[in-house]
Image (cartoon, grey):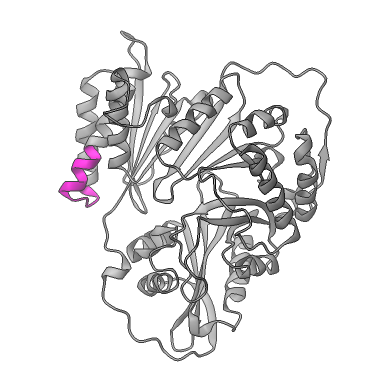
């Protein structure tokens, strides 16, 4: 469903425009007024207006055939982190990978203006995402965060109290947010990838909206001993990530993390979630071991998933390379363990059988059909960029004749944009994914495991492309035997393609 078909939340507005040049000024004026009402300052308003001008110009000038009049929608709505802008149109498919990185010295003259526009849009907004909505058309999503002072620039915390037993585990109250941000800063410095946790105002807003559910371990005296959270994604409402698990140093050894994990598991069940997943770091084995004790099972190794700047104060020294993570899953709904049937590449069969056996999900491996059905002309590839993490994620929702060329072009574009790691997910149950496995690996992707959903159609094979040719697959500390098997196969594949 496109945003134009959805009901508007309180305080949001939607403007239907025609693809005429005059629409650009109208869109900018409404956006500026709406952003100002949300409290953005003059400098931010100028950035927002410039970014919207570029995004709307793309629709007006390029989405439709010349001389044809069409409508598109601009939706503005409050987001826990600031302002979210959605631009929906039914125009020509758009592939951002076809736009070269902005470099006046190297970009082809005919594409320089397009490259500049894309550069300005990504510079103006904190998140830029392009979504293919199938028959719903396409959507550009822009998100601008409110400017806030991070926790390290505020008043120093009081001296740490002596350790006392944890009296209760409860949900965050709004006046806890400052201490939660300080707790994360004490454990990770400014290196934790989920940057919103460093801004107490964002912690409050995200918990209020339900996008983040923070649990705290608290002593009788009110001291916060630990934190853990469920991070929810509106695109996947049946599941959530268990993340931001931190125990204050003087409370370690009291089972604080386990109490927090058990609390959130029960809360997730009560709220009807069907699945939880986690990204366990590999700089040390403790997080993986803890997640296994909570019933999570490994399903993919994500090499270089977090920057090398990630720090584990008082636990590990500086990382020699980007930090890898183990993706692990726990099902909460037995029906989510329905049997899967899939055609898979021969080199992936043994690992996939082991992964699904560990997940306690029946997997039937089918023979490839004698004659492969023809692919449609156009497939569907979505992209999400996390510039601060130097991480890009590509997702194939449907294969077409143009999908491999699209992946090749996007890979080249993302490497030009200095993305250190590019993750690719393709549908497990689509037989075309098995046919394309060799071609995917020829692009430099390494098979990394599975990202399971709550239905067979949601399960995805995971591949990763690491830009660093010297990436050391032996560096991660892997706790499970299955994780070690994954690592061994990835290491061998990376070496063979070097």
Give the residues in magenta. 36-49
Q: Quadrant of residue 297?
A: bottom right
Residue at the spot 33% in from the left edge and 63% down from the top edge: 201
Is 407 rendered above or below residue 390?
above
Residue 181, x across and y down, in percent: 38, 69
Residue at the spot 20% in from the left edge and 21% down from the top edge: 22
Is 217 rendered above or below residue 213?
below
Q: Is residue 42 magenta?
A: yes
In the depicted view, which residue is nearer to us: 296 or 475?
475
Q: Total label count?
A: 0
In the depicted view, which residue is nearer to us: 123 or 320?
320
Query: Which residue occupies the extreme left position in the image?
Result: 42
Residue at the spot 82% in from the left edge and 46% down from the top edge: 362
Please name the predominant secondary structure of the magenta segment in the image: helix
Is 212 rendered above or below residue 343?
below
Compared across the picture, whether 305 is left or right of 87 comes to right
Quadrant holding the C terminus: top right
Residue 135, x across and y down, in percent: 52, 23
Residue 471, x across and y down, in percent: 55, 50
Is 179 rendered above or below residue 440?
below
Compared across the picture, whether 479 is left or right of 202 comes to right
Q: Is residue 92 magenta?
A: no
Q: Is residue 490 visible?
A: yes
Residue 47, x across and y down, in percent: 22, 41
Compared across the picture, whether 308 is left or right of 459 comes to left
In the depicted view, which residue is nearer to us: 305 or 245?
305
Compared across the picture, whether 446 is left or right of 156 comes to right
Q: Is residue 451 visible?
A: no
């Amino acid at each position: 469903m496109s945003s134009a078909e959805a009901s508007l939340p309180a305080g949001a507005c939607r403007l239907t425009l025609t693809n005429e040049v005059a629409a650009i000024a109208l869109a900018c004026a409404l956006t500026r007024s709406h952003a100002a009402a949300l409290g953005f300052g003059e400098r931010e308003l100028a950035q927002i207006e410039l970014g919207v001008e570029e995004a709307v110009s793309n629709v007006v000038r390029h989405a439709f055939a010349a001389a044809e009049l069409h409508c598109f929608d601009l939706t503005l709505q409050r987001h826990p982190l600031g302002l979210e802008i959605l631009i929906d149109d039914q125009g020509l498919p758009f592939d951002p990978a076809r736009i070269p990185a902005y470099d006046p010295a190297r970009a082809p003259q005919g594409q320089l203006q397009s490259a500049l526009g894309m550069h300005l849009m990504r510079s103006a907004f904190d998140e830029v995402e392009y979504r293919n909505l199938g028959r719903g058309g396409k959507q550009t999503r822009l998100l601008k965060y409110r400017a806030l002072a991070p926790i390290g620039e505020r008043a120093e915390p009081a001296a740490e109290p002596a350790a006392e037993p944890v009296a209760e585990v409860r949900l965050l109250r709004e006046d806890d947010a400052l201490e939660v941000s300080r707790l994360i800063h004490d454990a990770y410095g400014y290196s934790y990838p989920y940057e919103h946790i460093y801004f107490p105002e964002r912690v409050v807003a995200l918990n209020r909206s339900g996008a983040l559910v923070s649990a705290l371990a608290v002593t009788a005296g009110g001291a916060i001993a630990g934190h853990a959270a469920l991070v929810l994604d509106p695109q996947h409402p049946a599941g959530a990530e268990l993340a931001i698990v931190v125990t204050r140093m003087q409370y370690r050894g009291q089972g604080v993390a386990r109490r927090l994990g058990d609390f959130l598991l029960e809360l997730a069940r009560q709220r009807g979630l069907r699945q939880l997943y986690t990204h366990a770091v590999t700089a040390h084995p403790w997080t993986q071991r803890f997640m296994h004790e909570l019933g999570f099972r490994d399903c993919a190794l994500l090499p270089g998933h977090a920057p090398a700047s990630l720090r584990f104060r008082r636990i590990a020294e500086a990382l020699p390379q980007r930090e890898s993570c183990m993706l692990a899953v726990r099902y909460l709904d037995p029906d989510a363990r329905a049997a899967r049937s899939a055609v898979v590449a021969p080199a992936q069969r043994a690992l996939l059988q082991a992964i699904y056996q560990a997940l306690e999900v029946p997997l039937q491996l089918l023979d490839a059909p004698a004659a492969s059905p023809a692919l449609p002309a156009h497939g569907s590839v979505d992209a999400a960029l996390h510039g601060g993490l130097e991480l890009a994620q590509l997702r194939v929702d449907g294969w077409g004749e143009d999908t491999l060329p699209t992946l090749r072009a996007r890979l080249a574009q993302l490497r030009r944009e200095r993305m250190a790691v590019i993750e690719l997910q393709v549908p497990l149950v689509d037989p075309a994914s098995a046919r394309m496995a060799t071609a995917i690996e020829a692009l430099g992707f390494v098979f990394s495991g599975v990202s399971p959903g709550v239905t067979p159609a949601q399960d995805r094979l995971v591949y990763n492309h690491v830009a660093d040719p010297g990436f050391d697959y032996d560096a991660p500390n892997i706790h499970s035997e299955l994780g070690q098997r994954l690592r061994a196969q990835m290491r061998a594949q990376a070496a063979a393609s070097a």
